[in-house]
Amino acid sequence: MRRDKSLPLTETVYYILLALTEPTHGYVLMQKVEELSNGQVRLAAGTLYGAVENLLKKGFIVSIPSDDARRKVYAISQEGEKILHADYQRMTHMLSVTEKILNGSEFK
């Protein structure tokens, strides 16, 4: 099976896609990423909007209509859900293999 060239996702992109499983706008998105990452990923506005533009170009997220014209609302796309799930499976496999090896070794 060929691996998607978009994988692995960066930690930042992974958390952005995960946060956008519920449509939201930029400021709330920054807060959700920080919360989901337990404070490990903190996004500045410039970093967030650069990532958002990149994710829009790749088709991983979409812009959706908003009641507030001042705020752009984004949501994960079907393609974004596929790539998020693929990266989740990749990491799950890595953790499973690592656990088997470390639990059977001197690192117990």
Image (spheres, rainbow, N blue to C red):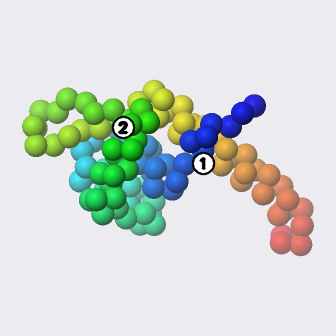
Q: Is residue 55 visible?
A: yes
Q: Which labelled disc corresponds to residue 8?
A: 1
Amino acid type at image mark 1: Pro
Question: Whole-percent x and y of residue 16?
Answer: 41, 48
Q: Which quarter of the image is occupied by the N terminus?
A: top right
Image-based side of 64 in relation to 56, left or right:
left
Q: Are marks 1 and 2 in contact (CB under 8 Å)?
A: no
Q: CA distance from mark 1 to mark 2?
A: 18 Å
Percent from the top left, x then y, of residue 47? 34, 58
The C terminus lies in which quarter of the figure? bottom right
Image-based side of 13 in relation to 72, left or right: right
Secondary element at image label 1: loop
> Which quarter of the picture shows residue 61?
top left
Task: Report which quarter residue 106 is drawn in.
Answer: bottom right
Position of residue 56 measured from the top left corner of the image (x, y, whole percent)? 36, 37
Q: Which mark is residue 24?
A: none
Residue farthest toward the bottom in the current orientation of the protein: 106
Q: Is residue 32 visible?
A: no
Left or right: residue 18 compared with residue 94: left
Residue at image point 30% right, 63% down: 44
Residue 58 lies, with reference to residue 100, above or below; the image says: above
- Residue that extends furthest to the right in the rendered view of this protein: 105
Q: Vertically, is 82 above or below 97?
A: above
Instruction: First in sequence, mark 1 or 2: give its number.
Output: 1
Callout 2: SS: helix
Between 104 and 70, the one nearer to me in the picture: 70
Residue appearing at x 54%, y 31% in the figure: 82
Name the residue that disc number 2 marks: 56
- Which amino acid type is marked by label 2? Leu
Q: Nearer the viewer, residue 23 or 78?
A: 78
For label 2, count other residues whose C-alpha is less than 10 Å away and answer few (under 14), some (14-19) or many (20+).
some
Q: Identify the residue at image location x=80%, y=52%.
A: 97
